[in-house]
Amino acid sequence: MNNATESFALLPGTAGSPVLLHVPHSAREIPASVRDGILLDDTALKEELDHITDAHTAELAALAAGAAEVTPWRFVNRLSRLVIDPERFPDEREEMLSVGMGAVYTRTTQRTPLRSADTDPGPLVDRYFHPYARAMTEAVADRLAVTGRAVVIDVHSYPTDRLPYELHGEGPRPPVCLGTDGFHTPPELLALAREAFAGLGGTGVDSPFSGAYVPLDFYGREPRVSALMVEIRRDTYMTEPGGLTGPGLAPLAAALTALVDAVSRS
């Protein structure tokens, strides 16, 4: 997989659906040309992928899409976030640069070297980040044009125990963390999510992770674009750090389906 246009997929939903399920961190694939720039040996890389990958979140989104009353659209990253992280700012605005995790990571989850410290992120950003961002922007623009609104629901997972790279991991780690944005997450959307996930052991807001992904062309300026990040604690549905799914996957899929249906009806 060397072509940037093959590194992500837009999976169509029902024409009238405003919902776009965004799955940015579920894949483990790393092209050979990118692997050459990573310092870890194969064993260490596998361990890092186990920790950094939001395992099975693409499957979770697919289950929800398949069961929804109105099929949502899905935008799925097919490459590991160790290639590029499409949800980072590609410049100095990104606070995760302080731990070597901007758009192109130079440090691992343990804060050890992943790439050489003098790595130029430009080639990877040009090859993978910008095409991804353009395609996601076009997907959101299409939902706006067709339905008059777009609702981006980010599907993530996070480890039960805090990892060293986390800048704000000292707070609660609920079964489901709902990440919000002050401009793009209306109270009504947050309330629908709280209700949808209420039966899964509890929800929290913006801890240990906050924010929600919106393409930069719309960020802070287009109120018709709503966004919410759904962060699922991994012990609720899988064996950590990178193992198989368990019985918790089905109720999570049902809850995500309920959220998609509620948003579609709202």
Image (spheres, rainbow, N blue to C red):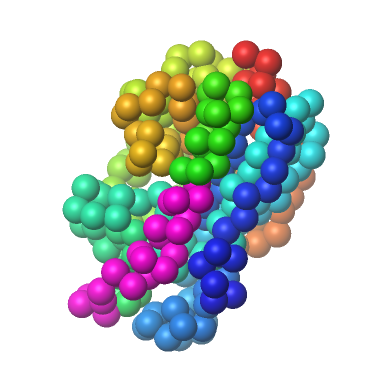
Would residue 27 be found to the left or right of residue 48 on screen?
right
Could you tell me residue 54's position as x and y percent?
55, 54
Placement of 218 over or under 94, stated as above or below: above
**Magenta segment, principal secondary structure?**
helix
Q: Is residue 258 visible?
A: no
Q: Is residue 42 visible?
A: yes
Residue placed at 57% from the left, 58% from the top? 8
- The quadrant of the image that shows the C terminus is top right
Could you tell me residue 184's position as x and y percent?
40, 25
Residue placed at 23% from the left, 55% from the top? 91
Could you tell me residue 210's position as x and y percent?
38, 36
Residue 85 vs residue 53, the one in the foreground: 85
Placement of 22 over or under 131, stated as above or below: above
Does the stretch in magenta take in 114?
no
Does the stretch in magenta take in 128?
yes
Q: Which residues are magenta?
A: 116-136
Residue placed at 55% from the left, 29% from the top? 145
Would residue 97 be found to the left or right of residue 68 on screen?
left
Residue placed at 25% from the left, 50% from the top? 94
- Could you tell me how many numbered marks the image carries? 0
- The quadrant of the image that shows the N terminus is bottom right
Please identify the residue farthest to the front as the structure is shown.
Answer: 145
Would residue 64 be found to the left or right of residue 92 on screen?
right
